[in-house]
């Protein structure tokens, strides 16, 4: 299922402002890659270019190539809707559809894709909720609104919703930043399980989290406020946290700035 | 944790449809335009062929053809989901066009018909000694009436409305404030004719006679204006940050001085805007004026004695005369009224933008 | 404790400390204004009721079921059946046309139009909401009525079998409840659009992104997240529009050619509405006739109270609901 992401020469704009410049990297299938860096360095923007969510923002514009295996996300004739269907996303704040039940939240993407049969929906919903480690907590109240769950449960519900459509890649934009430590731990465990099936890219502010969950880590930085963010280096997580090859990375990790 | 891993290793044949290739067949960018052009052409052909004389029918046929055509073509090329999306887009666009036509026509008709007899004489003369079937005459007396009635209404409603809003924001707690809030909402929905009837019945009950003065009309207008002023002022006062109030109170300034010297000046721009918008609203009210002021052909500068004219009522009465010169006068008066209301609106919005509290957003 | 208000009033916040005269006067004035507003509301109900009751008690017809309005006869016979029917039918037509189109325009402004176009359009529609109703009435009577002829003919020809679109005299002017409904629709369109647009605009971006990230098309985003979120807001916007349509006087009085007939043929020039009837009959009415009109106004007052109350209830519920998942 999982696919390789190959980014080359990617630059993203907000109107006239260049948010990130000339980023190239490769993300291997079935790995977790973490993006770290100071606020405003463009790591979230970069993440959103990987499923063409960036262009939803007014003035959002992208140059460069993002290859998913052998297909360019920004190639001609590519429908962004299909891209987002293939590359799932989990957001900073849990955002279940407020008017839908837990069941309908998970089934929403499937229904869009034309899955209508009750039995089929049931089995995928159950599988996805199990995959998100949420099944045991909600199986008795599948018809209750998703907004009634706790923050951590809501976030896992969003993960279940995202994996229900079997994407190739799962993008996570600071998925734990709005959660308490226990919920965070649950999500981190879940990420470890999910990577056997998906290519995962996660943006995080928390360096311990990057060290705990990721196989590879990319460090982003910007020269000054108003300058575009750049990829400083990407390497195995162990190397980045023990022996980075760039001084700025070491400074950031050891807490000298950022 | 382990059992889930086990479950994952068994390759479940995904019941989800296989991931499609990213690139799919897409209609070119000009497709909607081409479909629209085709629909209009066919509709014109049908319309001419069957001898339908109403252009509205041509338009409706074109619209239906456009929606159907974009669905069928998109469904064949891009698939059902995209086709539905396309239909939604064309419906949204059509609703926009459907709405723009009458609203544009309204403004356009008023301007073109209104400019026929609108000149200096029209603005400076009354209808005194002008037969309704004659051209000539003007709206001077109506402008006087409207200005006086609206001014009195504002003098009553603006202070009461602003004070009520201050009460609700600065003092209001408990049942009384809840009731006031609720009834302000309810009052906003009172039909203008009911406000007119109320003043009428009040005159009957208290004075035992029919009103027929500009002042009675002003009272009805004030009733319509008050809730609007309360609402908008309330919104503006709520935008004033609490820190400002606390800073002032902490300096030992009494509460009422804090409100008059700190809170109100901060929100003054917004309050002014609200009052001006509500003036624009009541200036066009016709029904209560028709019941209470009666209208007049001559200049009457005294709003407390004898009937007066007013612009909206003048339009109604000229329309009621039912002949061309009167229609022309009605349109010209309508143009003046629209211009007055629009200028008030534009100025009010200008003030709102210029004086917007810096902390607002 | 300030003392200018009746004891039922809640104590103001400043009550704990020694109240300065300035504070007491100012608080009293502002509270007094609030109370005055309540008094006005009560007075409206009381005065209207007093006059209405005296009129209805002398009515020799049934006030609720009589068709004609002959308060000048001796004995007087008048009833609101035709008026209530006409008011409700024309408002329902207006709602059926205006609400979908208004939601369409609101979506057009927020989701479809290029940003700058949307901004300008929103501004223009804001301005149009301020156009006085008499001007809609003038335009409706002089411009819209003749232009409705083709549509009337067409409806009569192809949908005459539905009875409601059966025009009994094809040559009669289109001064019908149907035309009134369309004119009211055009009139309330800007208000419904504005309020709906405001509600949609306030929707948090994250709900839309949730749908987008699942691979939803623009329409699916609207269906999955925008419309469910905005639904109660749109309903209350529609109720506000309905309130306007029910009470509208001038746009109806200029267009409708009224007669005391209650008919399902919506294209025929007949029928009447509360406010139209009041304005039309007021000039020739004597004291008693005016009281009778006041009685019909009282009914209109209660209908609009109900509609507005319902709208407020929906808004209040919406607040709770959006607070629950903030």
Image (cartoon, coloured by chain):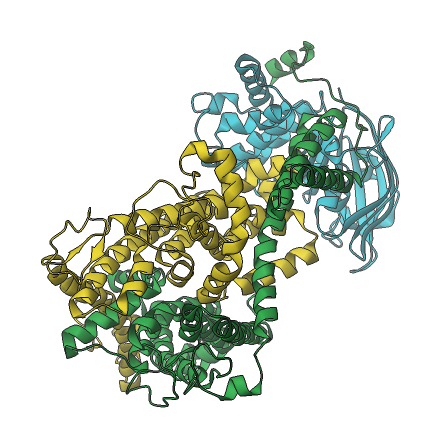
In depth, the one of C279 and B189 nearer the eye is C279
Whole-percent x, y for residue B75 in the image: 71, 27
* Residue lying at 48% horizontally and 71% vertically, measured from the top left: B277
- Which chain did the renderer colour yellow? C
In depth, the one of A190 and A101 nearer the eye is A101
Whole-percent x, y for residue A152 in the image: 54, 35
In depth, the one of B223 and B295 nearer the eye is B295
* Quadrant placement of the N terminus of chain C: bottom left
**Direction from residue C210 to residue A219 in the image, left or right:** right
**Direction from residue A181 to residue C48 in the image, left or right:** left
Whole-percent x, y for residue C259 in the image: 31, 53
Residue A218 appears anywhere in the view: yes
In depth, the one of C175 and B94 nearer the eye is C175
Whole-percent x, y for residue C184 in the image: 45, 54
- Identify the image quadrant of residue A187: top right
Above or below, B152 against A148 in this view is below
- Identify the image quadrant of residue C265: top left
- Which chain did the renderer colour cyan? A
* Residue lying at 50% horizontally and 66% vertically, measured from the top left: C131
- Which chain did the renderer colour green? B
Residue A91 appears anywhere in the view: no
**Direction from residue C205 to residue C310 in the image, left or right:** left
Above or below, C64 against C164 in this view is below
Give the mark count: 0
């Amino acid at each position: 299922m999982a696919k390789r992401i190959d980014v080359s020469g990617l630059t993203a704009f907000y109107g006239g402002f260049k948010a990130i410049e000339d980023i190239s990297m490769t993300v291997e299938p079935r790995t977790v890659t973490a993006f770290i860096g100071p606020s405003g360095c463009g790591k979230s923007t970069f993440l959103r270019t990987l499923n063409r969510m960036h262009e939803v923002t007014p003035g959002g514009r992208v140059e460069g190539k993002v290859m998913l295996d052998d297909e360019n996300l920004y190639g001609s004739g590519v429908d962004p809707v299909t891209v987002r269907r293939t590359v799932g996303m989990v957001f900073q704040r849990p955002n279940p559809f407020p008017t839908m039940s837990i069941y309908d939240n998970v089934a929403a993407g499937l229904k869009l894709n034309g899955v209508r049969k009750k039995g089929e929906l049931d089995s995928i919903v159950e599988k996805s909720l199990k995959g998100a480690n949420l099944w045991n907590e909600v199986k008795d109240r599948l018809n209750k609104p998703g907004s009634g769950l706790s923050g951590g449960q809501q976030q896992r519900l969003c993960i279940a919703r995202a994996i229900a459509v079997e994407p190739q890649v799962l993008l996570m934009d600071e998925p734990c930043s709005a959660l308490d430590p226990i919920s965070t731990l649950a999500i981190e465990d879940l990420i470890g399980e999910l990577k056997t099936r998906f290519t995962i890219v996660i943006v995080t502010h928390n360096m311990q989290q990057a060290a705990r969950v990721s196989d590879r880590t990319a460090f982003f930085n910007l020269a000054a406020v108003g300058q575009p963010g750049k990829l400083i280096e990407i390497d195995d997580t162990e190397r980045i946290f023990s022996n980075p090859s760039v001084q700025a990375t070491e400074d950031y990790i050891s807490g000298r700035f950022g | 944790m382990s059992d889930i891993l086990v479950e994952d290793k068994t390759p479940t044949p995904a019941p989800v449809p296989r991931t499609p290739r990213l690139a799919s067949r897409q209609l070119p960018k000009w497709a909607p335009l081409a479909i629209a052009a085709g629909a209009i052409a066919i509709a014109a052909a049908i319309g001419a062929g069957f001898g339908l004389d109403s252009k509205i029918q041509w338009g409706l046929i074109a619209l239906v053809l456009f929606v159907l055509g974009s669905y069928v073509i998109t469904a064949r090329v891009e698939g059902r989901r995209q086709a539905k999306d396309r239909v939604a887009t064309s419906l949204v666009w059509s609703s926009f066009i459907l709405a723009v036509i009458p609203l544009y026509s309204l403004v356009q008709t008023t301007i073109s018909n209104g400019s026929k007899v609108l000149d200096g004489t029209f603005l400076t003369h009354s209808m005194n000694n002008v037969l309704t079937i004659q051209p000539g005459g003007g709206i001077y007396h109506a402008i006087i009436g409207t200005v006086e009635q609206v001014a009195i209404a504002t003098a009553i409603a603006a202070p009461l409305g602003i004070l009520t809003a201050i009460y609700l924001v600065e003092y209001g707690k408990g049942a009384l404030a809840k009731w006031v809030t609720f009834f302000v909402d309810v009052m906003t929905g009172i039909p203008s004719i009911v406000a007119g009837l109320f003043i009428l019945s009040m005159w009957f009950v208290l004075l035992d006679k029919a009103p027929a003065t500009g002042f009675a009309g002003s009272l009805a207008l004030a009733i319509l204006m008050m809730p609007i002023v309360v609402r908008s002022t309330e919104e503006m006062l709520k935008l004033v940050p609490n820190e400002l109030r606390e800073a002032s109170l902490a300096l030992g300034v009494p509460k009422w001085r804090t409100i008059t010297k700190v809170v109100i000046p901060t929100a003054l721009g917004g309050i002014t805007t609200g009052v001006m918008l509500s003036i624009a609203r009541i200036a066009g009210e016709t029904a209560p004026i028709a019941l209470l002021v009666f209208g007049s052909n001559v200049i009457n500068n005294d709003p407390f004695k004898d009937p007066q004219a007013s612009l909206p009522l003048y339009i109604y009465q000229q329309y009621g005369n039912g002949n061309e010169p009167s229609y022309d006068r009605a349109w010209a008066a309508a143009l003046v009224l629209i211009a007055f209301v629009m200028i008030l609106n534009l100025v009010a919005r200008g003030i709102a933008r210029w004086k917007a509290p810096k902390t607002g957003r | 404790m300030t003392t200018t208000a009746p004891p039922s009033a809640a104590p103001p916040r400043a009550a704990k400390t020694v109240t300065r005269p300035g504070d007491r006067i100012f608080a009293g004035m502002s509270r007094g204004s609030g109370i005055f507003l309540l008094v006005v509301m009560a007075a409206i109900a009381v005065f209207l009721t007093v006059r209405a009751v005296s009129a209805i008690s002398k009515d020799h017809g049934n006030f609720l079921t009589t068709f004609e309005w002959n308060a000048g006869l001796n004995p007087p016979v008048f009833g609101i059946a035709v008026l209530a029917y006409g008011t409700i039918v024309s408002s329902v037509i207006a709602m059926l046309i205006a609400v979908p189109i208004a939601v369409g325009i609101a979506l057009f402004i927020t989701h479809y139009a290029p940003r700058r176009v949307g901004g300008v359009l929103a501004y223009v529609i804001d301005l149009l909401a301020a156009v006085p109703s008499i001007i809609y009435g003038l335009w409706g009577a002089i411009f819209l009525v003749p232009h409705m002829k083709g549509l009337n003919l067409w409806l009569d020809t192809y949908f005459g079998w539905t009875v409601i679109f059966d025009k009994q005299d094809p040559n009669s002017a289109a001064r019908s409840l149907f035309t009134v409904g369309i004119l009211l629709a055009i009139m309330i369109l800007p208000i419904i659009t504005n309020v709906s647009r405001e509600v949609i605009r306030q929707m948090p971006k994250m709900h839309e992104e949730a749908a987008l990230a699942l691979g939803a098309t623009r329409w699916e985003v609207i269906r999955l997240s925008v419309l469910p979120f905005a639904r109660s807001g749109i309903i209350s916007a529609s109720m506000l529009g309905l309130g306007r349509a029910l009470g509208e006087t001038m746009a109806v009085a200029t267009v409708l050619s009224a007669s005391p007939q209650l008919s399902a043929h919506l294209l025929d020039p007949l029928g009447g509405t509360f406010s139209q009837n009041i304005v039309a009959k007021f000039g020739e009415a004597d004291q008693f006739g005016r009281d009778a009109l006041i009685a019909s106004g009282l009914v209109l007052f209660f209908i609009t109270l109900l509609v507005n109350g319902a709208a407020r209830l929906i808004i209040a519920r919406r607040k709770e609901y959006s607070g629950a998942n903030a």
